[in-house]
Image (spheres, grey):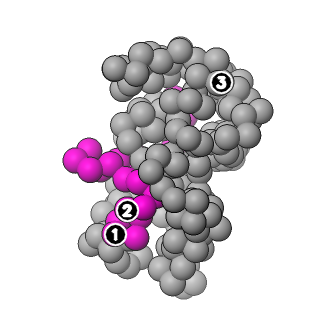
Amino acid sequence: MAKSSSSPYQGYYCPCLIVCHRLSEFVIFSEIRRVLKIPMGVYFDRKNGLNIESIPKFLNVRFMKSPGNFRKEFSHDPIKCSKSGFEDFRIYFVMDVDRATARQVSDFLSKATFKDHWCSSYVHPILSRPNLDVVTEKAGYSLDLAHKGDSYGRIMDTVFLEDLPQFSANFTAIKATNISDLIDYLLESHNKMKH
């Protein structure tokens, strides 16, 4: 994965790839990437999106078939590698429950969905129940559900570097999501790169 030339963190490795469920998640984490200016990947399939129930199919797309293909696909931000694989790297799957069955949700959270796939040891599941829209409103943000992408963009336009800890804290108290785990990890990665 490659570094953006505008990043002050040139020479640092990519701490994660965030695989997004839909546009809303993509907007949030693209904006957080912009604010933090760290070399991280944010992936979103604009044509189909990604649901919990479609993850097994996603794991068989070309760039997910092997670590080598993965590194080539996301070569714009370098991933630290050793003989045993990627180091200090995570793949976050940020999903909603939507139409997934209880078993599919359980398998996603326990990482059974990723069993026997090369990426399983890097996966960190992030889930919003029933979905990100409900969780975001519980966190105190208003959404225009007819224009969700724009709504999330407006929310993120008000979140600056100094606001990210509070933005994360707004989600921490909500038991229906663990999205703050990811935001906190990104802040921690940013802070490590600063020093």
Residue 108 is situated, as x and y percent measured from the top left of the image, at 56, 63
Instruction: Give the residue number, with chain letter if any, for mark 1.
Output: 57
The residue beneath circle 2 is 54
Tell me if label 1 and label 2 are in contact, CB under 8 Å: yes
Q: Which is nearer the N-term, disc 1 or disc 3?
A: 1
Q: Secondary structure at mark 2?
A: helix
Q: Is residue 37 above or below residue 59?
A: above
Query: Nearer the N terminus, badge 3 or badge 2?
Result: 2
Judging by the rendered image, the residue that carries numbered circle 3 is 139
Mark 1 surroundings within 10 Å by alpha-carbon count, few (fewer than 14), some (14 through 19), many (20 or more): few
What residue lies at 38% left-to-right and 42% top-to-bottom? Answer: 22
Q: Secondary structure at mark 1?
A: helix
Q: Picture coordinates of residue 102 (x, y %)?
A: 58, 59
Q: CA distance from mark 1 to mark 3?
A: 32 Å
Q: Which residues are magenta?
A: 33-58
Q: Considering depth in this image, is 50 or 84 the residue closer to the camera? A: 50
The spot of residue 6 in percent (x, y) is 40, 35
Residue 96 visible here: yes
